[in-house]
Amino acid sequence: MKYTRRQAAIFSIVALGIVLSPIVQNWVKTPTDSFPFSYYPMFSKKRGATYGLYYVVTYDSLGHKEHLPYRLAGTGGFNQVRRQINKAHRNDGGMTFLKRVEKRLVKKDRAYYHGLTRIELVKGYYHLENYFLNNDTLPLLERNIATLKIKE
């Protein structure tokens, strides 16, 4: 089936109009989201200045702190491990999870494990604007959720 230039132009204008129609929401007092022509409130939603997240840190015999790489903390990709950590905190405060992390370290990276004195599940609070714009990657506050001391 062949289309004429006129039919192709009309189709293109209609398709372009449909795709651009959510722009109207920029001038509405209270924008609405109507899938599939979404205004994407997840991107425009007002968020707080700080954001808290859970992660695992390790300490060596000299007291040096290091963030445990996600591949050693759990199974799967980055987001899957992040969800495992969040679930561990909700379920039992994280102790069972830390014991599994210890077993994984013994199995996968014995040299790294050998120098450790403790593994901690912490919640760090970060100032998002400073984190992304000024590369200020230090947390404003870190709260210890669970600690597993490693037996020598």
Image (cartoon, helix red, strand yellow):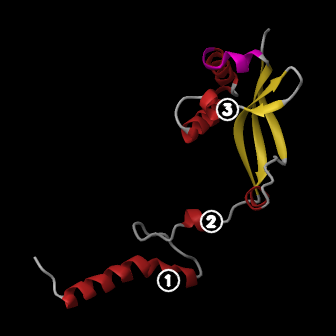
Residue on which disc 1 sits: 24
Q: Locate residue 70 relative to residue 128 in the image: left or right.
A: left
How many dots with numbers? 3
Depth order, front residue of 80/35: 80
Q: How far apart are labels 2 and 3 at the CA level?
A: 26 Å
Q: Secondary structure at mark 1?
A: helix
Query: Which residues, given as a range, are shown in magenta?
Result: 107-114
Residue on which disc 2 sits: 45
Do callouts 2 and 1 mark residues in contact (Cβ within 8 Å)? no
Q: Of the residues shown, which amino acid type is indicated by label 2?
A: Lys
* Residue 70: percent from left, percent from top: 63, 34
Which residue is at the far left?
A: 1
Q: Quadrant of residue 100?
A: top right
Tell which circle, 2 or 1, labels the residue nearer the N-terminal end: 1
Q: Of the residues shown, which amino acid type is indicated by label 1?
A: Val
On the question of residue 147 being in view, the answer is: no
Q: Locate residue 71 relative to residue 23 in the image: left or right.
A: right
Residue on which disc 3 sits: 89
Q: Quadrant of residue 59?
A: top right
* Residue 102: percent from left, percent from top: 68, 18
